[in-house]
Image (cartoon, grey):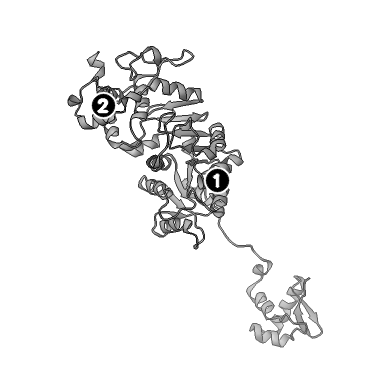
Amino acid sequence: MDSTSSTSTSPPRTTDTEDVRPDRCPSGDAARASPPGGGPAPSPERLARAALTRLIEPGDAVMGRWLAELGATTVVDVVRGRLHPGPYGLDPGRVGDYRARCAALDPVADLRLVQAHGGRFIIPGDPEWPSQLDDLREGRPVGLWVRGTGSLRLLALRSVALVGSRACTAYGAHVAGEIASQLAERGWVVVSGAAYGIDSAAHRGALAVGGATVGVLACGVDMSYPPGNTELIRRISEQGLLVSELAPGVHPNRFRFVLRNRVIAALTRGTVVVEAAVRSGALSTARRARDLNRHTMGVAGPVTSELSAGVHALIRSGGATLVTDASDIAELVGAVGDDLAPPRSGPVLPRDLLEPSVARVLEAVPGCADGAPVDRLAREAGLSPDAVLQHLYELVSLGYVERFGAHWRLVRRR
């Protein structure tokens, strides 16, 4: 073994044109490292990080610190037993825990499998890597498996997360779909978790208007989970992107759903919670977004619904800003001065345009068939009879009142 190359602590190279030698390839087989089609072989750094996505759970802060200090190739060599952990200051017990899962590592096969599904594996330093994920620090993904044709970095630059309860109400599904459609029509990318409920409604809303959407999965990008969303997940891969920290074929579990929420929060400009109970997992995404200094927003729902209680508590505590549609969201997360929401006001009625004294006379005219004389209208309006008479003729021309003998009355409209 070339100990000089194995123990180097210099920053790892991420180019895919490096020579892959048997002593540096995590699979230990340089011949198998060449991808199908005769393209450039994956770099040792890429292979090592691909192996780690199957070795560790997402958000492993200990592994994140090791990678920052030593680089992925050295860490994998230590875990595989090619290097002793002592000189590198790594905890032997922790290394032993990782080593127990080494038998299943075959990064070359994983890279080939994801390529067969039209996907790829991106790592920090790649042109497609979204730099905002670096805000997660030690919990940053070691790499991302991506399926689809768009650039994750470019799509994430103008993206909003829409999350909420899986067991949502018809109200919540409608609101999520409407907001997602409005955002997509404004050029925003909708990001969610491809789960049932609010997630599905958000993805479908964006897809319905031809918008781009990103699904962050808690399983491999070659899998469809939940099974009932198989067709939706296929459409997302064709019209947007599927993203996962987990290697191909890895199944979801309860903790992986929670851990993937941090990626949704970090990837986007802001997170909108449409509908969530007090103990909803969607609130963890909102808390992550708030901790990362992202905009956190909530949509109010019926006060009688338990599925709105969590959102209402989030808004009441100051942890989220109340929003009602895409214009409110765009004003918060968009460019200053360019994405302002239009001012909200009720409809302007013709009576609103009357001068105050004319409006007072109109209010004094009774609605009964007999009407009232000018002197009585003058007392009611607090104006002189001459002024009232002048205003009455103005109101006649506008079609509000009519003369009935010596009396005046409102025009009866059918």
Residue at figure coordinates x 29%, y 32% from the top left? 63
- Residue at mark 2: 70
Please say if 32 is above or below 298: above
The C terminus, quarter of image: bottom right
Q: Is residue 253 visible to us here?
A: yes
Please name which of the two marks, 1 or 2, marks the residue nearer to the observer: 1
- Residue at mark 1: 201
The N terminus, quarter of image: top left
At numbered mark 2, what does the secondary structure look like: helix, strand or loop?
Answer: helix
Q: Is residue 212 visible to us here?
A: no
Query: Disc 1, disc 2: CB below 8 Å?
Result: no
Provide residue 247's location: percent of width, then percent of height. 41, 29
Q: Residue furthest right?
A: 405
Please say if 343 is above or below 263: below
Amino acid marked by disc 1: Ala
Provide residue 97's location: percent of width, then percent of height. 26, 31
Residue at figure coordinates x 40%, y 53% from the top left? 279
Amino acid marked by disc 2: Leu
Q: Nearer the viewer, residue 155 or 336?
A: 155
Dot 1 surroundings within 10 Å: few (below 14), some, or many (20 or more)? many
In terms of sequence position, does the residue under pointer 1 or pointer 2 come before the other? 2
Q: Nearer the viewer, residue 54 or 392?
A: 54
At numbered mark 1, what does the secondary structure look like: helix, strand or loop?
Answer: helix
Provide residue 387's location: percent of width, then percent of height. 69, 81
Q: Nearer the viewer, residue 268 or 168?
A: 168
Judged left or right of residue 142, residue 411 is right
Q: Nearer the viewer, residue 250 or 293?
A: 250
Q: What is the quadrant of residue 111 in the picture?
A: top left
Please say if 220 is above or below 396: above
Q: Residue furthest left?
A: 86
Provide residue 250's location: percent of width, then percent of height. 42, 32
How far apart are the two marked residues, 1 and 2, measured between alpha carbons? Answer: 43 Å
